Amino acid sequence: MPESLFADANSSLEEARFAIFGVPFDGTSSFRSGSALAPDKIREASYNFETYMFEHGEDIESINYCDLGNLEEFDNVNRMVQGVEEFAGGIVKRGKIPIVLGGEHSLTAGVVKCFDDIGVIVLDAHLDFRDEYEGEKFSHCSTVRRVSDAIGVKNVVPIGVRSFSKEEEVDAEELGLRFISSYELSEKTTMHEALEMALRWIDKDRIYLSLDMDVIDPAFAPGISNPEPFGLTPLEIKKCINYLADRLVGFDIVEVSPPFDNGNTSALATRLVRETIMAIWKAQT
Ligand code: MN
Ligand code: MN
């Protein structure tokens, strides 16, 4: 069923509040590639779920959202980021909320450029703060660095981090990147407290959320490109989405790698996309 659209995406772009699109690109993947296959796998998994979401007391069929399919298969990361910026820009200009299915994390740098005056919260096991990786400025290892270039380092907060190089640590210190590790989340602070702190640091009314699925522990999300132990639970991500829903302007979900998945990771990714659509719709309607 790879040709099918995301379940219940029955709206036209005109009527839609949300516009889903996929970016089948994994050109800079450093370990387990395959995330180019994720947009269609996430769509396939979307048919698993009830349309009624009882904890929200609403049916997702009541919400107008569309699926615009996948972007072309770019042969180069710079062209991909540019293509994403142009495509997402069209969605944002029409007043719709983009929901982006990766692909690898490098795409986020393109989407955030479509917004003025936003903060970005990144859920990620990795700091993604390398200035470049293997000669690529727009590598998936450099996402937070490129987002910082675009909107200012003070306006980006990675959460759930548990892996970075010494060089990234030094740069983060020097440039003033603040982040919250997965250890802080398990020992000192709840997800709500962490988000309150992040929102105080950022001090913007509008937030873009980027979910690198490897922030979740590999026990729950095994099918990802760079598995990193000591991660978050799926329920913490759900709480995060709900906490931020009243101020979210866009969302991406990246780094699912179907060749390494038993099906649970794409199912979880789909469920978190559905959660995001429902939570934003409820909080902003
Ligand atoms: Mn990442
Ligand atoms: Mn990561």
Image (cartoon, rainbow, N blue to C red):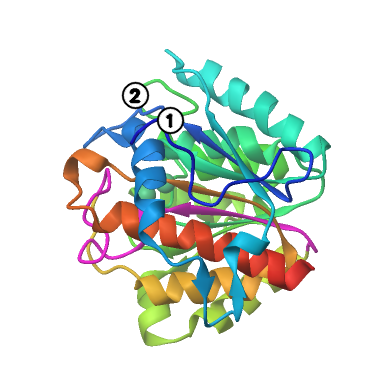
| Label ID, residue 227 | none
Magenta highlight range = 204-226
Residue with the mark numbered 1: 139
Residue with the mark numbered 2: 134
Residue labelled 1 has its Cβ within 8 Å of some atom of ligand 1:
no
Whole-percent x, y for residue 137 in the image: 49, 26
Above/below status of 15 relative to 29? below
In this picture, residue 168 sits left or right of residue 68: left
Residue labelled 2 has its Cβ within 8 Å of some atom of ligand 1:
no
Residue 112 figure quarter: top right
Q: For the residue marked with disc 2, what is the amino acid?
A: Glu
CA distance for labels 1 and 2: 8 Å
- Which of the image's four quarters has the C terminus? bottom right
Question: Observer-nearest residue: 43 or 210?
Answer: 43
Q: Main secondary structure of the magenta part?
A: loop
Q: For the residue marked with disc 1, what is the amino acid?
A: Ser
Q: Which residue is at 40% across, 30% downward?
A: 3
In this picture, residue 157 sits left or right of residue 223: right
